[in-house]
Image: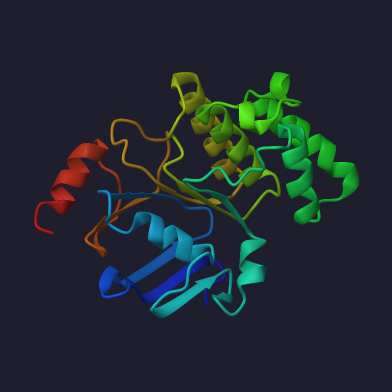
């Protein structure tokens, strides 16, 4: 496998009972790429991200991340991934600071490094003044900010983002764009799903469009996302 290739997917299919959700997908993603994943509700975007991070098992096909195979080497794969999912994946009875401390320990981040990363990320996501607030009292947007900090905490090689703009106000969206630009510039590979076609990060290498579980577009973003999406799905 090429040293630049991070993700390799071959003939990937996923069924829920009799219902096919993904239909024989092939996908290659190089290290450092920023890939935007587009599709209508039910097109398979979230299912694909769950398969890539090892939270779901494929019905058939091959998934390799960084040379490791899923699901056989899921533990090694998950250690390389930062995930921002629909659910915040936070502990509501812990504070923001305690949540990040907990996940830092899970990722085996050195004790001397934990506080520095935690405090820097709380500052970057705009939660430094709420670090000691219980998560159960946070708004949806604040939980989204903290979830982003959690996903970035261990400086992953691969960042998977499922509708990350959800719950964020304009300031939060600008903060997210800034953090994603910094992560991309540092060499992190990013796959981000979104249905908000009116906004996109400053730099995107590729767009993928799913329709009814099939890949109907894989290429560059020329012009606005809405036009690209309409054209890609017109004949799907």
View extreme (left): residue: 235
Image quarter of residue 61 = bottom left
Image quarter of residue 18 = bottom left
User: Which residue: 40% across, 48% down?
Assistant: 205
Give the image location of residue 165, x and y in percent: 43, 34
Give the image location of residue 33, x and y in percent: 47, 53
Q: Is residue 46 positioned above or below 151 on the image? A: below
Q: Nearer the viewer, residue 86 or 80?
A: 86
Q: Quadrant of the C terminus?
A: bottom left
Q: Is residue 231 positioned above or below 201 on the image? A: below
Q: Nearer the viewer, residue 42 or 79?
A: 42
User: Which residue: 71% across, 18% down?
Assistant: 129
Give the image location of residue 45, x and y in percent: 35, 55
User: Which residue: 67% across, 42% down?
Assistant: 91
Left or right of residue 177, residue 72 in this image: right
User: Which residue: 66% across, 69% down?
Assistant: 75
């Amino acid at each position: 496998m090429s040293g630049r290739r991070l993700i390799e997917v071959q003939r990937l299919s996923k069924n829920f009972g009799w219902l096919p959700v993904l239909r024989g997908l092939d996908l290659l993603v190089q290290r450092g790429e920023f890939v935007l994943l587009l599709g209508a509700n039910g097109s398979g975007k979230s299912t694909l991200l769950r398969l890539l991070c090892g939270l779901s098992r494929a019905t058939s096909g091959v998934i390799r991340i960084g040379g490791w195979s899923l699901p056989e080497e899921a533990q090694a794969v998950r250690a390389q991934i930062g995930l921002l999912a629909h659910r915040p994946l936070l502990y509501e009875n812990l504070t923001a600071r305690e949540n990040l401390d907990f996940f830092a320990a899970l990722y085996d981040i050195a004790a001397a490094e934990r506080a520095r990363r935690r405090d820097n990320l709380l500052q970057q996501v705009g939660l430094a003044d709420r670090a000691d607030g219980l998560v159960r009292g946070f708004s949806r947007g604040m939980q989204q900010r903290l979830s982003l900090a959690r996903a970035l905490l261990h400086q992953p090689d691969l960042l998977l983002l499922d509708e990350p703009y959800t719950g964020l106000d304009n300031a939060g969206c600008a903060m997210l764009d800034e953090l994603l630009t910094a992560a991309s510039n540092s060499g992190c590979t990013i796959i981000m799903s979104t249905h908000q076609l009116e906004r996109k990060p400053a730099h995107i290498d590729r767009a993928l469009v799913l329709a009814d579980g099939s890949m109907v577009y894989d290429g560059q973003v020329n012009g606005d996302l809405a036009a690209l999406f309409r054209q890609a799905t017109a004949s799907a």
